[in-house]
Image (cartoon, grey):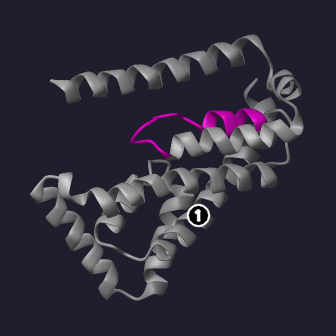
Amino acid sequence: MENKIKRRMLALILILCFVAWSVLIYNYSPDEITEAVGVKNGYILAFIIAFLGGTSILFPIPYYLVVFTLGAGGLNPFILGAFAGIGLMAGDSTSYLLGYHGGDILPIKLRKLFMKTTNWCLRCSYKLIFFVFLLYGSIIPIPNDLITVPMGLGKYPYWKVVIPLGIGNIIFNILVALAGFYGWGSFF
């Protein structure tokens, strides 16, 4: 019963964030939002919101809407994407740590599945794993928890997870910021 309430609360928070940002975008242009936030603060805001979005187990925040909007508001898409990507990876580190230290609370079937995944990764060449994690981080817009939790559970080396996912997240966020920077005028 308690889990059901928590899931509903998380869904409500996600919906409220999306609605609030939609109302903000409807009433103010990205240029006005960026001007109100300020350039330096815009990069910090992207980092913080992406960090919270990276802790998607705790805060399901669609941070990429902020990155897109700030990109459309004229912030440098490369710097913006780097700040958001680093913030996202820092947030995703919480999921890795949850798997690493909290694996005992997972159901046995799920734990066995995660261990199979981690064991497969340990048997593969790191070049292949690097490429897979990089590709996942750069083109798949779903939470990195699908990788970080099982890798933490299997005690897969942290840096072997963070480096490729982090680079992939930076690439993804640069692309989102570029879409905002160059694409906003095409939509409106």
Q: Considering the image in quadrants, where does the C terminus appear?
A: top right
Q: Please say if 67 is above or below 124.
A: above
Q: Is residue 47 above or below residue 13?
A: below
- Image height check: is 187 above or below 42? above
> Does 69 appear in magenta?
yes
Determine the secondary structure under disc 1. Answer: helix
Q: Residue at x 79, y 35 (%)?
A: 72
Q: What count of labels does the image hold? A: 1
Q: Residue at x 15, y 66 (%)?
A: 112
Query: Where, quadrant-wise, is the N terminus in this rendering?
Result: top left
Q: Position of residue 126 (x, y in %)?
A: 45, 85
Give x and y (percent) for residue 116. Answer: 20, 72
* Residue found farthest to the front: 101
> Is 5 in the magenta?
no
Give the x, y percent position of residue 183. Answer: 76, 38
Residue sticking out furthest to the left? 108
Say which residue appears at 65% left-offset and 56% top-offset.
Answer: 86
Horizontal side of 131 relative to 148 (left or right) equals right
Asked which quadrant contains residue 39, the reply is top right
Camera-side residue: 96 or 76? Answer: 96
Is 39 placed above or below 120 here?
above
Left or right of 99? Residue 178 is right
Viewer-nearest residue: 51 or 81: 51
Q: Position of residue 22 (x, y in %)?
A: 62, 18
Mark 1 surroundings: few (<14), some (14-19) or many (≥20) residues within 10 A: many
Decide if residue 183 is on the left or right side of residue 129.
right
Q: Which residues are magenta?
A: 55-70
Residue on which the image places disc 1: 166
Residue sitting at 27 percent across and 79 percent down?
Answer: 120
Check disc 1 and give the amino acid type. Answer: Gly
